[in-house]
Amino acid sequence: MKGLLIKDLKLMMMQKNFFILILLITMGMMFFSDDVIFPLGFLSFVVSLFAISTISYDDFDNCNAFLFTLPVTRRIYVKEKYSLGLILGCLAWCLAMLLAFIAKSIKPEFPMPLADLFLLALAILPMVFVILSIMLPFHLKFGSENGRLALIVAFALIALIGIGINEGMKWIFNFDILQWLNSLQSLEFGTVVIIEFIISLIILVISLNISQLIMQKKEF
Amino acid sequence: MLKIKDLKKNYGDFFLDCSLEVNRGQITGLIGQNGSGKSTTFKSILGLVYPNGGNITVFGKDYHDLTTKEKENIGVVLSDSGFSGYLRIKDIVPVLDNMYRTFDKSYFLEQVQKFQLPLNKQIKDFSTGMKAKLKVLVAISHDAKLLILDEPTAGLDVVARDELLEMLREFMEKDENRSILISSHISSDLESICDDLYMIHNGKIVFHEDTDVLLSDYGLLKVDEDQYHEIDKQYILRVKKEPFGYSCLTNQKQFYIENYPKITIEKGTIDEVITMMIRGLQK
């Protein structure tokens, strides 16, 4: 897996200007606005999605075929993409936290206490995991171009199904899911973050297994 | 080393049905026209496509059952795939170094220098010859026991092809237990390095022979109508109608030289054998 990670890091180096731009935008948002949570999420999401771009490089010119003749199994390949996404997301999150801390230090008018800021930022990580869990299987299955289209269709379907289920539950059991979700706000925020982490990790494991099945069936 | 038995793969109208074997210490060639099934055979061996039937064993095991450690003993060149064109040689050195425990970095860099391959240039900007040399270099730089090379000389000029074949000869000389399966549609490449040859046509193996036997015993009889009716046809494999009479492919050239001294007999070359096996009629 180490060899694959090195390959992907080398490929990502090609996008270093884009990365610097993202970093500058994040810094701009952090230092020139009061909201540090949005730029923190922005940096974490965008950088973790660099892992998706390496799938496009592998797809290009049928490079995948050669990769699987190296001492690499399809399972290792999938695990490497997930690991890369998680590593990038977590590193970007750490970097964004550092920037947020600096921003808070140099702006005495910054209202939020550090502990609250940390907890709010922590809530972003599971969201990064979920986004990766959704995007990776789509890109592995449909490739970069069709993957984007498939993802939009999937989100639309999920939204329709969600609305359908909610309406159905209301009609049959007189139970409003959205109201129930809102009631969770009464829980302590730390508990919500822990629940978020548990759910996102379950989704991540399910997604990893689906991606491995997708790759197992692919022909090159 | 490698055994394929009754491999079957269907793509629409195309049916592959192939059996072949690569023995230890030998270079086996697979020759055929474009679209004859060479690449599908290679991809099936390497687990890149799933066969509809048959059995493929590499080092005595199904390819999918090979561990990553065992896969390190295989070096591969694919005609339509390789490292991403956006990488440079200096990028792929650490990749290979971390993938193969036996990667010989100093040999690799030595050869890169010898062939004047640029370390800092993206592979996509290499010439066809440079790309081909790099692919073969990657395959031979980690002490592989088996090389599987699909069209490694495609698109190369004579000099580059010769350099590449020389690399393969040197690779074989270093260890007598090494083996190579190589495909090409250029017969002279295979003629010069292969111990035995398989010919594939429309997805089927139509011919298998040791290269030495092919070059020494095979011949092409050029006969007119009368001579054709007169000759003993028990050693004639294929016959083709020609303006002057018939061309007959034999695998017992000496028999006809001794018994029919007046007949024109040409030495068998791979190209002629291919042409006759594909276009000629079975006697």
Image (tube, rainbow, N blue to C red):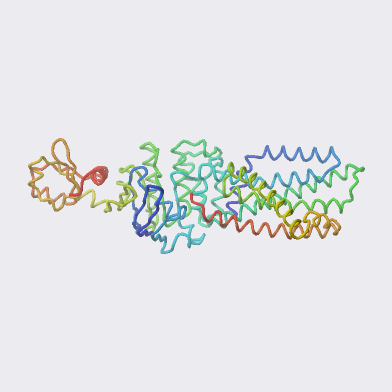
Residue A147, x across and y down, in percent: 60, 45
- Tally of numbered discs: 0
Establish if B6 lies above or below B272. Answer: below
Q: Nearer the viewer, residue B261 or A184?
A: A184
Residue at the bottom extreme, as displayed: B60
Residue at 10%, 43% in the rendered image:
B263
Query: Hey, which quadrant is residue B221 in on the image?
Result: top left
Q: Is residue B55 left or right of residue A195?
A: left
* In-image side of B204 versus A2 (left or right): left
Q: Position of residue B266 (x, y in %)?
A: 17, 42
- Quadrant containing the N terminus of chain A in the rendered view: bottom right
Q: Position of residue A75 (x, y in %)?
A: 56, 57
- Location of residue B220 by image quarter: top left
Residue drawn at x 91%, y 46% as measured from the top left? A111
Percent position (x, y) of residue B269?
24, 44
Which residue does the image show at 57% across and 47% down from the upper left?
A: A142
Residue B170 versus residue A128: which sits nearer the camera?
A: A128
- Vertical side of A74 occupied by A35: above or below: above
State the residue lying farthest toward the front.
Answer: A171
Left or right side of B45 for B240: left
